[in-house]
Amino acid sequence: MLQYLSNDFEYHELDFNKKYIELARNEFGDRGKFYIEKVGDIVRVEWLETFDIVNANGILHHLRDSECKLLIDLAYRYLKKGGKLVTFDPTYHDSQSLF
């Protein structure tokens, strides 16, 4: 996603897959901040009501329903008033959660 954004965005990316975070760090360097962690492992108080947009692209189909709920709850807490949560999961597999 970062490759499509202008340089005036503050960008934070979380993924529990170390390989993906390392690839992002190598490609984008200091254009963003990259964290190896699972959604909900850390609640960052400094992020509360901070962001205009939270993007959960291609992740929901990997999560259990309880994890999807946690992601949405955290996104709500991290968003400024009037902020938006954007999700897009362009895939389906038989064992994914109902959410």
Image (cartoon, rainbow, N blue to C red):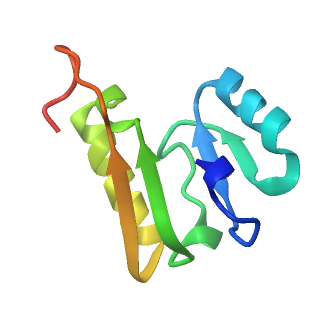
Q: Nearer the viewer, residue 26 or 45?
A: 26
Q: Position of residue 45 (x, y in %)?
A: 59, 69
Q: Position of residue 53 (x, y in %)?
A: 48, 68
Q: Residue furthest top?
A: 94
Left or right position of 9 against 89 = right
Q: Residue furthest bottom?
A: 81
Q: Examine the rendered structure and indicate whether residue 90 appears above or below residue 47.
A: above
Left or right position of 80 against 11 = left
Left or right position of 99 against 13 = left
Left or right position of 9 against 79 = right
Q: Position of residue 55 (x, y in %)?
A: 46, 55
Q: Position of residue 70 (x, y in %)?
A: 34, 49
| Residue found at x 75% / y 28% | 23
| Residue found at x 66% / y 55% | 12
Q: Residue furthest left?
A: 98
| Residue found at x 68% / y 68% | 9
Tell me the quarter of the picture where residue 32 sits: bottom right
The number of callouts visible is 0
Q: Quick one: quadrant of the C terminus?
A: top left
Q: Nearer the viewer, residue 54 or 74?
A: 54
Q: Examine the rendered structure and indicate whether residue 34 appears above or below residue 93.
A: below
Tell me the quarter of the picture where residue 11 sits: bottom right
| Residue found at x 66% / y 27% | 20
